[in-house]
Each structure stands twice: as C-alpha cells, then as structure tokens.
Image (tube, rainbow, N blue to C red):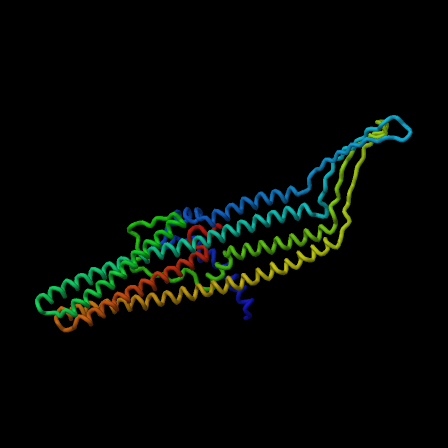
Amino acid sequence: MSRASGACATVLAWALLAPIAWADEVAPPPHLPSTAEAIAWIDGDASVARARHGIAAAAHGQAALTAGAQEWQVRMQGQRREIQDSATVSREWLLQLERPWRVNGKAGLDRQLGEAESTIARARLGEARHESARALADLWIAELAARRRQALTSSQVELAQGNLDVVHKRRQAGDAALLDEQMALAELGDVQREHNLAKTALAKAQVATRTRFGAEMPAGLGLGGRGPDEPLLAEGLWLAKVLEEADLLKAAEGELARARLAASRARADRIPDPTVGVFAAREARGNERLVGVSVTVPLGSVHRTQRALQLEREVDMAQAMLDQLRRETEMEARATWAEAQGSRERWQLGRETARLTSENARLMQRAYALGEADLQALLMARRQAAQGGLAALEAQAEALRWEARLLIDAHLIWDLAHD
C-alpha cells in the first residue's frame, strides 16, 4: 500500500469509527483547569481577543466587498459662452449622474471573496485558541511542578537541619568529629540553596500564569503521584483527528480558496466595467435643453492580462504552502506522539529510580544511627535521593505536558472541538 492510500485508509477509518469510538469532548485530567475555567481564561487571552477582532473586521470587509467599491458620482459643469458679433451671452450648464457597474460575474465573485475572508478569520481564531490552550496547559503544569519542587526541597531542608542537630549533639558527646559537623552544615547550605531556587521558580511560574491568563491556581491542587494515562485514541485515529481539527490547515485552505477566487476575479476583470450615467444640459441661451445617457467603457490593456497571470501564479503558491503545512503538521503531530510515548516511559523509569534511591537513603540513615555507616555515605545517599526525586518530578511534569498536548491537539478538551 502506498503512503497516500494508507493516509486515505486512516482518514476513512476515523470517519467510520469516530462516531462510535469517541465523542467530541472529554473531561480534562484532574490536575488541569476545568472546561469552564479554561474557556474563560483562553477567551480572555490577548491573542484570542485579537483574533476575535479579526472576525469582526472580516465581517465588515465582507459587507464592503458585497456592496462593491462602485459609487454614484455627480458631475456638474457650468460655462459662459460669448457669441461673436452678438451682444448676448449664453450661460450654460451640465448635470450628470453616473456609476460603474460590475459585469461578467464580478459581483458574485466579490461576495465569495468576502465569505472567504470570514472563513479565514474564523480559522485564525481557532488557531489562536488552540495555541492559547497549549500555553495555558504548559504554564499550569509548570506551576504545579514548581509547587511540588518547593515541597520536596522543603522536606530536604528539614532532614538536613535534623541531621545537623544530631551531628552537633554527637560532637558535644565526643562521638563525632568537627569535620562531620562541617559536612552536615555544608549539606544544609546546599539544600537551602535548592529550596530558595524552588521558591523563586514557583514565584515566576505564578506570575507567568497570572499575568497572561489572570488565572489563580487552587491552594490544595497538586500533582501528587499521578502520571499520564494511556492515550485515549490509537495513533492512527489520533493523527487523523489532529489533521482534521488543525485550524492552521483550515486557514491555509481558506487562503487557497481566496487565491483562486482572486484569480477568477482578475480574469473576469479583463472585461472592463462600464460606467453608465444620465445627464441633463442647458445650452444656446436656454433654447436647447438636453437629456441623455452616457456609457464609458475603459479599453483593456496589458496590465489586466498580466495581473490575471500574476494571481494565477499566486494560486500555485497558496497550493504549495498548503501542501507544505500539511506535511509539517503531520510531522509535528507524529513527533508529539513519539514524545508523549517516550516521556511516559521516562516517567516510569524516573519514578522507580526515585523509589530506590529514597529506600537506599532510608537504609543508610538507619545504618548511620547504628554506627554501621559514616556521615559521608549518609549524605551521599541523601543527595542521590534528592536528585532522584527532582529528576522524577521533571519526568512527571514533562509526561503530563505531552499528555495535555495530545488532548489539546486533537481538540478533545476545553471545548476546542467547537472552534
């Protein structure tokens, strides 16, 4: 089977199975904002507001194209005529009302061009909401991860402080050396520095979410031990839905339709629009009164021909752009799927590694209390456990970000399917 026929089979499978296998919308994961909250924050984003203004502007443009740029014109002319060998003067005037008229189907093409502009504007709004949803999910998960990181480093500070207190008491009792106390103090300084970095990262994450979306995260919300779920759709169905819902492709398809209409309009314009008018005049000292009809027809030139040829080439450009965007969108979607799968596996590995290093630190703490291990070995085990916990947190946040990307790109959450 060729690649093209395989793609057609995938799309056909989605068309047949989607009504049975999947609804348009699912509930977002519990760590993400609810649909009502997300819609409010996304619609309040500046980029979405700008795209919505674009729809309003396109509606006015559509009305203007439908009405046409042809306007009624009034021409008034007055003159004073002196007749040789006559003492009388003839005062004469001309009043003319005229208007260009669209011929050769141009009015219908202009109306379709206006509709194409509105279609493109709606697709751009959908793309703006899609990108805003991506940003909201990324910022939200980053803030959750920053919260978790602060909690982890806070517990490390408590452990390091407790360890320093124990070493200090043992040194006073003559059971520990000054070097041990200094090592414990240095360990406390390191974890305090990490905790300070975690607090700074949380503050920055909160500022970013609040500044862009005005969003406030509930105090009790956290990541916990949750990882990404298995994908809700098989890869082929998910890819077909992403390509079907891609607003960027819808906008490019609208651009292609507009380019074709513009080329048709230019071909039609090779027959110039006539200007038709009526006029009334007074001449010969009022003895002559004229009423008539005027028709003015421009003579077509090479400009109209070359303009039509130019717009036909622009149709080819728009087609090539659409083909390029389709390939790029499919490539990005396949990369997203691969990243989501890989990040899920990395999170599972990181979680297991963190569990082992934490258990090792617990056993080392017990051995140190029994005098079976020295302080340096204990600090090393704790450092490994802390690093393992942070690495697992990063893997968890990354996996959840890619899970959210799968849902958002397929327009499965936050009412994106209705764009």
Residue sitting at x 49%, y 61%: 240
The relative height of residue 335 versus residue 105 in the rendered view (above or below) is: below
- Provide residue 169's location: percent of width, then percent of height: 11, 64
204 or 254: which is nearer to us? 204
Quadrant that contains the N terminus = bottom right
Q: Is residue 68 above or below residue 345?
A: above
**Drawn side of residue 211 relative to residue 84, left or right:** left
Left or right: where 186 falls relative to 280? left
Taking the image as shown, residue 276 lies to the left or right of residue 2, namely right
User: Where does the image place residue 8, in percent across and percent down from the top left?
Assistant: 54, 64
- Res. 362 image quadrant: bottom left
| Location of residue 196 by image quarter | bottom left
Q: Position of residue 13 (x, y in %)?
A: 50, 62
Q: Nearer the viewer, residue 335 or 21?
A: 335
Q: Residue at x 69, y 42 (%)?
A: 70
Residue found at x 35% / y 57%: 142
350 or 87: nearer the eye? 87
Point out residue 326 in the picture as x, y percentages from the top left corner.
Answer: 54, 62
For residue 367, which quarter of the picture?
bottom left
